[in-house]
Image (tube, helix red, strand yellow):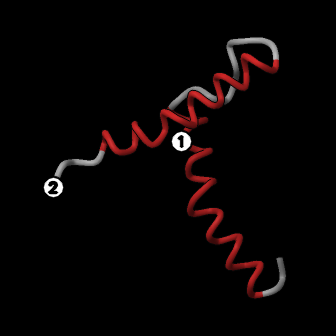
Amino acid sequence: MTSEAGRAVTQERAATSETVNADLKTFRGLSAFAVRGLQRVRCVALGSALAYPVMRFAAVPAA
């Protein structure tokens, strides 16, 4: 990513998707799966992906 556009994309990605990945791995236990099989792992990953926005908005204080 030596171009200016490439650096902008990398910076935007770090601010959005990498924050979500770090949160899921650190606080939600998504680093190691307690299930076996592709279908079950997919269910756990999708459940975490669906629960992430709910957890984030629940933590925001009401204005």
36 up-or-down from 32: above or below: above
Q: Residues within 10 Å of mark 1 (few under 14, many from 20)?
A: some
Count the labels in the image: 2
Relative image position of residue 3 (x, y in whole percent): 81, 86
Q: Residue beneath label 1, please? A: 23
Q: Looking at the picture, does residue 19 appear above or below residue 32?
A: below
Which quadrant of the figure contains the N terminus? bottom right
Helix, strand or loop under label 1: helix
Q: Is residue 16 left or right of residue 60?
A: right
Looking at the rendering, which quadrant does residue 24 occupy? top right
Between 56 and 39, the one nearer to me in the picture = 39
**Mark 1–mark 2 contact, CB under 8 Å?**
no
Q: Give the residue drawn at x 73%, y 79%.
A: 7
Tell me if mark 2 has few (under 14), some (14-19) or many (20+) residues whose alpha carbon lies within 10 angstroms of its own: few
Residue type (three-letter) at the residue carrying disc 2: Ala
Residue tagged 2: 63
In the image, is residue 46 above or below residue 11? above
Q: Residue sitting at 65 percent across and 64 percent down? A: 13
Give percent across and percent down for residue 44: 64, 23
Q: Quadrant of residue 42?
A: top right
Q: Farthest residue toward the left?
A: 63
**Percent position of residue 23, x then y:** 53, 42
Determine whether the residue tagged by mark 2 lies in a helix, strand or loop.
loop
Residue at point 63%, 62% (across, down): 14
26 with respect to 8 (left or right): left
State which mark lies toward you, 1 or 2: 2
Q: Point out residue 54 in the picture as x, y percentages from the top left corner.
A: 40, 38
Mark sitting earlier along the chain (1/2): 1
**Residue type, mark 1 in image:** Asp
Q: Viewed as shown, does residue 12 lie left or right of 23?
A: right
How much space separates mark 1 and mark 2, taking CA atoms? 24 Å
Decide which of 3, 57 is in the foreground and name it: 57
